[in-house]
Amino acid sequence: MSEKEKHQFLIIDKSAVTWDGAPTTLDPNDNVNLPQTSDGSLCLAYQNMAKMNNNGTLSLTSGGAAPVFLTAQGLANAPSIVVKNWGGNNLSLTNISLTSSKTPIWVSVVGPGLSTTPPANLPTNGTQVSLVSGKAAQGVAIPRWMQLIMQATSGDYTLLVVIGGPPDASGNNCYVFGLNAAANTGPGTGTPAPAGFYATSSGNMATYQFNWGSSAIFVANESPSTSAAGSISIRAL
């Protein structure tokens, strides 16, 4: 079988499978389609995995709207983030980088109820829950101020996504944290967080205080590296 035939088969194979947002890598011209998103905030992460300094392009379409073209920066040491409510529509992603550029793009979408794997239980008594990349935990907060403690348990860059509580003025209730990042950014640092992020930390730990009443809280490890493990816990303040 020729390389072209192999590549065509790969495209058909990936498009035929119903995608649930699980981490996957798209070669140029590959597509994945999430048939239906939730009507609430979701987190799309994507990262250029090329070994050369090639920028890539990811096409995003949803619900018949015009495509949005996202630049996947070459040699990036952390994923780019899009936090959005796609209103229950489909979400289709295509790597439209030049075929000759050999620029694979890693993609992932997380949110409550998307994955076919149920989330682990997240207690509110301070018990630590381990999260490897691609896994999530979910619990119900109690109606008082609480603190979420997030820790990267490896030296790898770790991406943790928190979803829950009432939406803000923009309709968002998704908060994205990068641990073992290049810099401290976000609230209290004087430096704005990168697009889509709530905060980043150059250390291996971050905390988030909230009072959401009796509301569900969902936390996922969306790190590109499968070795990027983390742990989370919630305690009352």
Image (spheres, helix red, strand yellow):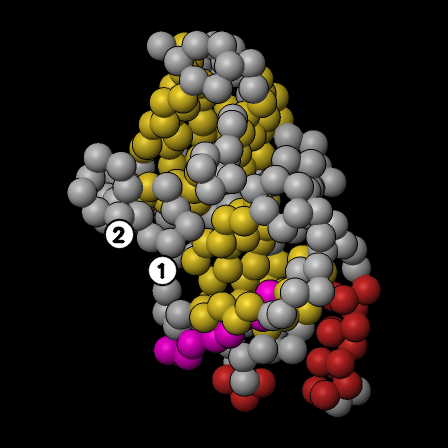
Q: Say which residue appears at 34% left-offset and 27% top-offset.
A: 207
Total number of numbered labels?
2
Give the residue at mark 2.
Answer: 182
User: In the figure, residue 113 lies in which quadrant?
Assistant: top right
Question: Can you give x and y, in whole percent of width and height, for residue 131 in the image?
Answer: 52, 34
Residue situated in front as seen by the camera: 146 or 38: 38
- Look at the numbered discs 1 and 2 and tell me whether their residues touch, using CB distance below 8 Å: yes
The residue shown at (76%, 66%) is 15
* Residue 118: % across, % down: 69, 32
Q: Eyeballing the image, is 173 above or below 25?
A: above
Q: CA distance from mark 1 to mark 2?
A: 9 Å
Is residue 110 placed above or below 46 in the rendered structure?
above
Q: Name which residue type carries label 1.
A: Asn
Question: Which class describes the residues within 10 Å of circle 1: few (<14), some (14-19), or many (20+)?
Answer: few
Which is nearer the eye, 158 or 188? 188
Residue 154 shown in magenta: no
